[in-house]
Amino acid sequence: VCNASGSTDLDNDNLVYYYEFRAGSKIVQKYSINNSLDCLKNADCKKKTYITCYAKAFDSKNFSAEKQSNNRIQIQNNAPTLPIAVNLTPISGYRNTKFNCSASGSLDADNDTLTYYYEFRKPGRILQSYSTNKQYTCMGYCVKNDKITCYAKAYDKTAFSLEKSGTNATILDSAPTTPTSLRLLPPTAYTNTKFYCSASNSLDADSDKITYYYEFRNQSGILQKYSANNLFTCTNAKCGQNDRIICYAKANAGNVNSSEKQTNPVIIRNTLPTAPSQAILSPATGYKNTNFTCTASGSTDLDSDKLVYYYEFRKGNIKLQGYSTANKYACLTNCNSRNTINCYAKVYDGWINSSEKKSNNAVIR
């Protein structure tokens, strides 16, 4: 506001004062009877410029010479308003979670470009001081159950707004690190092998007690689900020849697991069962309608597989009854007097057959 006074007129005319406002030599509001300047509505009112008022008197016909105001006023900076919203996401995370803070809603009367500055805190401690970095990862400065708060303020290159606090984020129980060492023993295995798996070297940022959990799988799926049991016996899952046994392990720190680590596969080998030590065909003599019986025994299997005996009946090189679990045979139309009958036996362990054993001779009368 500019107020002029002190002009006189020899004709005693009524005097009206006119005002003009200038920024340096630039006119920001031309002469008029308006003695006020609204800088908010005038783009020429720029920060750090000096506004000077000029005035002259008018007697309805002529103007007096102008008079410059005794002082000038510097346009000051208007600080931006504090942010309306400050949001921290995600609302929960772990020590290695990257939290993001976003502020908005600040206004600036000078129409300055605004930049938001962010600070991250937990009760009693500044975690990351004010900067334009809107992201923060706790790492070594947080423990589970800490409450992380983001604060934000707007900056117009001259002044900051007041700060506004945002939403909280809770630090959850940190996951332990994946085991760096995992061994599956023995390296050579058979269908009756008992496996032992051992994991180690996981770390927990919260210093929680670590327990290792194990799962055993083959190429087709899970053989033994995750548990603290690190032993697995092949016979319980009927491991087969050429199966690929893999142990998976992860560390548990109470409420959260690490990612899993797996061993290299151990290939299941199968030991060939031994041939029957004897195959007895009885009776030793008979007729075309005689029901001959073959009984084999004496096979062994190092894998402790269940063994099943198979039998085949022959007359010389002629097959009378092919291999099956049937150990009885009656010649009927296939035999003649003085023919010699033999039984051949072999054993099957579920995966492979043994070599065969020839029985004694039985003669057809």
Image (tube, grey):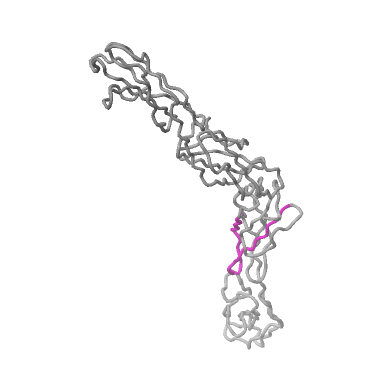
Q: Position of residue 250 (x, y in %)?
A: 60, 43
Task: State the quadrant of the N terminus.
Answer: bottom right
> Observer-nearest residue: 197 or 187?
187
> Observer-nearest residue: 221 or 359?
359
* Residue 156 located left or right of residue 123: left
Q: Is residue 51 above or below residue 102?
A: below
> Observer-nearest residue: 114 or 292?
292
Q: Is residue 20 above or below residue 39?
A: below
Q: Residue at x 70, y 46 (%)?
A: 145
Magenta span includes 302: no
Q: Is residue 343 above or below residue 171?
A: above
Q: Residue at x 66, y 45 (%)?
A: 173
**Residue 61 falls in image quadrant:** bottom right
Q: Position of residue 260 (x, y in %)?
A: 57, 45
Q: Which residues are magenta?
A: 99-122
Query: Which residue extends farthest right?
Result: 124
Q: Residue at x 60, y 41 (%)?
A: 197
Q: Position of residue 192 (x, y in %)?
A: 53, 33
Magenta span includes 110: yes
The total number of labels drawn is 0
* Residue 21 located left or right of residue 353: right
Q: Is residue 145 above or below residue 98?
A: above
Task: State the quadrant of the C terminus.
Answer: top left
Q: Residue at x 55, y 44 (%)?
A: 187
Q: Position of residue 205 (x, y in %)?
A: 69, 50
* Residue 153 located left or right of residue 298: right
